[in-house]
Image (cartoon, grey):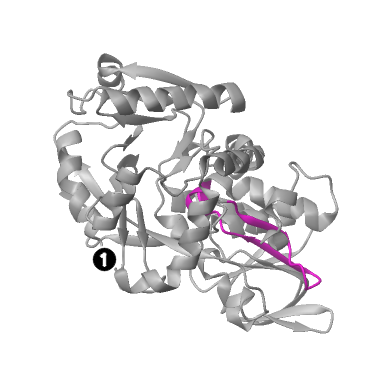
């Protein structure tokens, strides 16, 4: 089978790359070992984070570092056995998270984030799935005056520099927007620009359906079979060998299966995360996604129920599940919102692909003609899927790019 391009990985990023290439007249094969959207793209918080100009950094607050070292918080957990392997990455991550460096990274990262909602809406409108997207923003809840004042000052600085919009909420304001939340909350920040998705996997599936309606093909196969054959790239699928002049690695946390094989030493680590769905008690309704910022968990209204998501777990990618953060967060979440019974039979776990400078890797492979990278989006895979897909497709077709791709190049390490 012949195609112009092979896209390896059918998460939200790979799907959007394939879709944008197909829209630009390229014949594309999208390949994954599983059904599209059933790995990390299945279990995120469902946010399209227009306000997320500062990628999630490593804390420099020594109080927070001490709490994390005790390994008993809801927002972070680590496997002791994984630390020797993760230590070099964590050290670089900490260095890049220093305030001055983090601010410089944000200025390079912001152009991608600025396009996130508009690019999603463009694809969702074309795919006929705007009913999955809610333009209500989300709310960061604060419990103490110190944190509320600090986060409001931060939000105001972001508004001045990056044009993100928010509304400051006091206790009454929170109660008006979310009457079923704990009334002892001090206040919060309503980020008004972001959108939320009530079923991330269904959104991915709708984008795949659009891709296929334009002539794209979705096949099952093993990305590890990718090989250079003359001037082509080949890969084995359930329907035979596919060859193409170009290939895109969009495998998220599994991208190293290709990059290491081809001799690239790209610093890629994973943050694992968990979710569980709950039925609300009685007539309780959650109108917005809410982050209990000082307790380290998030509640999101989804089709399946109220989704409780956890922070970061530092562990080997393929280690067995250890959903201790869910166990810690659930009792606290029940005091915040009236959660009923669990809907899922077991906790879901996913892995976020992370780079030490917190920015994705987008662009051509430095030493292989016709090979492209699109991975490392960490917490913002859903947020940045469509704009990444557009950017990669524009580079591959020689078009003017929607943003400057140079900050995200693979050879920056």
Residue 18 at x, y percent in the picture: 67, 59
Quadrant holding the N terminus: bottom right
Left or right position of 130 against 235: left
| Residue 188 vertical position relative to residue 387 in the rendered view, above or below | above
**Disc 1: CA contacts within 10 A as few (<14), some (14-19) or many (>=20):** some
Residue at the location (78% across, 60% down)? 26
Residue 158 at x, y percent in the picture: 54, 27
Residue at the location (54% across, 34% down)? 50
Is residue 371 inside the magenta stretch? yes
Work out whether residue 207 or residue 94 is closer to the camera in this orientation and state it. 94
Q: Is residue 141 visible?
A: yes
The residue that disc 1 covers is 322
Work out whether residue 164 or residue 237 is closer to the camera in this orientation and state it. 164
| Residue 364 vertical position relative to residue 46 in the rendered view, above or below | below
| Residue 139 vertical position relative to residue 363 in the rendered view, above or below | above
Is residue 145 inside the magenta stretch? no
Residue 131 at x, y percent in the picture: 47, 37
Where residue 355 sits, quadrant-wise, is bottom right
The stretch in magenta equals: 359-382
Residue ranking furthest to the front:
62
Where residue 314 sits, quadrant-wise, is bottom left
Callout 1 secondary element: loop
């Amino acid at each position: 089978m012949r195609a112009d391009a092979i896209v390896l990985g059918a998460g939200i990023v790979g799907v959007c790359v394939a879709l944008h290439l197909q829209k630009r007249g390229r014949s594309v094969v999208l390949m994954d070992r599983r059904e599209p959207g059933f790995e990390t793209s299945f279990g995120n918080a469902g946010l399209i984070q227009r306000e997320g100009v500062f990628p999630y950094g490593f804390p420099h607050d020594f109080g927070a570092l001490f709490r994390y070292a005790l390994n008993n918080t809801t927002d972070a957990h680590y496997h002791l056995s994984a630390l020797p392997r993760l230590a070099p990455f964590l050290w670089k991550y900490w260095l890049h998270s220093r305030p001055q460096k983090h601010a410089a990274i944000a200025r390079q990262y912001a152009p991608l984030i600025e396009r996130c909602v508009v690019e999603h809406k463009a694809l969702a409108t074309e795919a006929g799935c705007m009913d999955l997207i809610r333009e209500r923003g989300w709310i960061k809840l604060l419990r103490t005056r110190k944190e509320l004042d600090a986060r409001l000052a931060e939000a105001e600085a972001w508004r001045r520099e990056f044009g993100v919009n928010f509304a400051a909420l006091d206790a009454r304001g929170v109660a008006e927007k979310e009457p079923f939340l704990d009334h002892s909350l001090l206040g919060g920040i309503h980020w008004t620009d972001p959108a939320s998705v009530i079923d991330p996997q269904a959104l991915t599936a709708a984008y795949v359906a659009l891709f296929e309606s334009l002539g794209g093909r979705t096949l099952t196969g093993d990305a590890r079979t990718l090989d250079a054959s003359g001037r082509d790239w080949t890969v084995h699928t359930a329907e035979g060998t596919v060859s193409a002049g170009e290939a895109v690695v969009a495998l998220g946390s599994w991208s190293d299966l290709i990059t290491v094989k081809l001799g690239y030493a790209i610093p890629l680590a994973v943050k694992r995360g968990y979710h569980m769905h709950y039925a609300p008690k009685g007539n309780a309704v959650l109108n917005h996604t809410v982050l209990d910022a000082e307790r380290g968990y998030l509640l999101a209204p989804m089709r399946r129920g109220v989704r409780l998501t956890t922070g970061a777990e530092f562990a080997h990618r393929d280690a067995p599940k250890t959903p201790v953060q869910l166990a810690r967060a659930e009792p606290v979440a029940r005091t915040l919102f009236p959660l009923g019974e669990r809907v899922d039979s077991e906790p879901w776990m996913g892995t976020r692909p992370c780079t030490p400078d917190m920015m994705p890797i987008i662009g051509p492979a430095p030493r292989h003609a016709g090979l492209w990278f699109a991975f490392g989006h960490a917490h913002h895979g859903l947020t940045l899927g469509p704009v990444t897909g557009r950017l990669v497709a524009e580079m591959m077709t020689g078009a003017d790019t929607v943003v400057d791709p140079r900050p995200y190049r693979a050879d920056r390490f």
